[in-house]
Image (spheres, rainbow, N blue to C red):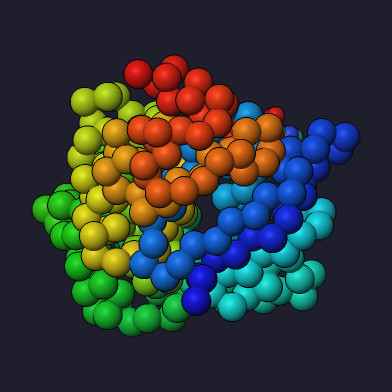
């Protein structure tokens, strides 16, 4: 049973058509790497899955929620989907612990102790247990991004979406964030990750979807990254070397 299904999804911004009929699906526990050149529509596709953008046509189903349906219960969808962006957007005036307990307390209405227990478990998972009472500005970029991942995990989502979460980081700091995502993948989390880290995608992804000009141009196992079938993916992978 797939957890995420996109069927012939089309999306335009004004006169600019960005998605020309995108279809792919993700099974429970699967890690899907979404790759492609800048501007190919990866972020738009990801944002449509969490209904941060609405599709013009086609269907998206996520954990049983019909995301394309105008009557979608957004709150329920967002309870099942976690999303992490390139910019971590932690609240600067709150400690890391407060950042992570905020949504469990305000959205899920958990009590202080229960929210704190979940937050600490998530912070330990990303290796930040000892930074719980620090403020974001006291952390490195890599640590802040790990805190943002913990904040998402604290809501216990069924699917995690990652949009180039390491591209704003100093190359020295990307490794620690990728390690956290890799551990999460190994723990069985279903995830879609937009990434430019080809080595990482090769190692962690069960499946790879290569987007080109708003369409899925090639997809398959991570093996397509070493043995591309289309000229476009071959060129994309070559440029990365
Ligand atoms: P990628 O993530 O693969 O780099 P995006 O999905 O961000 O690609 O963008 C695909 C195209 O859609 C780009 O040409 C971009 O400028 C355009 N685009 C994305 N979001 C918007 C928006 N909100 N309004 C207008 N154009 C947009
Ligand atoms: Mg993008």
Q: Spot the residue most to the left.
A: 130
Along the horizontal axis of the image, is 115 left or right of 43? left
Q: Position of residue 107 (x, y in %)?
A: 49, 74
Along the horizontal axis of the image, is 237 left or right of 232? left
Q: Position of residue 140 (x, y in %)?
A: 24, 34
Residue at the (72%, 43%) spot, across then down: 19
Along the horizontal axis of the image, is 110 left or right of 179? right
How many numbered marks are there? 0
Q: Is residue 110 above or below residue 88?
A: below
Q: Position of residue 176 (x, y in %)?
A: 20, 40
Question: Which part of the image, by quadrant, shows the C terminus?
Answer: top left
Residue at the (32%, 40%) spot, across then down: 202
Q: Position of residue 235 (x, y in %)?
A: 50, 21
**Residue 168 visible, this orientation:** yes
Residue at the (80%, 38%) spot, across then down: 17
Along the horizontal axis of the image, is 147 left or right of 236? left
Q: Quadrant of residue 159?
A: bottom left
**Residue 95 visible, this orientation:** no
Residue at the (30%, 74%) spot, across then down: 115
Q: Quadrant of residue 92?
A: top left
Name the residue nearer the viewer: 52 or 15: 15
């Amino acid at each position: 049973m797939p957890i995420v299904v996109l069927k012939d999804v089309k999306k335009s911004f004004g006169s600019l058509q960005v998605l020309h009929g995108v279809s792919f699906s993700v099974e429970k526990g699967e890690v899907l790497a979404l790759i492609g050149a800048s501007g190919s529509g990866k972020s738009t596709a990801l944002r449509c899955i969490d209904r941060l953008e609405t599709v013009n046509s086609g269907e998206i189903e996520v954990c049983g929620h019909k995301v394309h349906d105008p009557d979608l219960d957004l709150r329920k969808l967002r309870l099942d989907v976690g999303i992490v962006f390139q910019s971590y957007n932690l609240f600067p005036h709150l400690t890391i612990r407060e950042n992570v307990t905020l949504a469990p307390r305000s959205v899920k209405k958990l009590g202080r102790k229960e929210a704190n227990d979940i937050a600490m478990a998530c912070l330990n998972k990303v290796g930040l247990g000892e930074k719980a009472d620090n403020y974001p500005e006291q952390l490195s970029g890599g640590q802040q991004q790990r805190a943002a991942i913990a904040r998402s995990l604290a809501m216990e989502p069924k699917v995690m979406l990652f949009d180039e979460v390491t591209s704003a980081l100093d190359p020295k700091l990307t490794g620690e964030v990728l390690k956290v995502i890799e551990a999460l993948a190994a723990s069985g989390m279903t995830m879609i990750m937009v990434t430019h880290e080809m080595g990482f995608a090769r190692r962690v992804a069960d499946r790879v979807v290569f987007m080109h000009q708003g369409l899925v141009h090639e997809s398959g196992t991570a093996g397509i990254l070493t043995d591309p079938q289309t000229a476009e993916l071959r060129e994309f992978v070559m440029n990365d070397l």
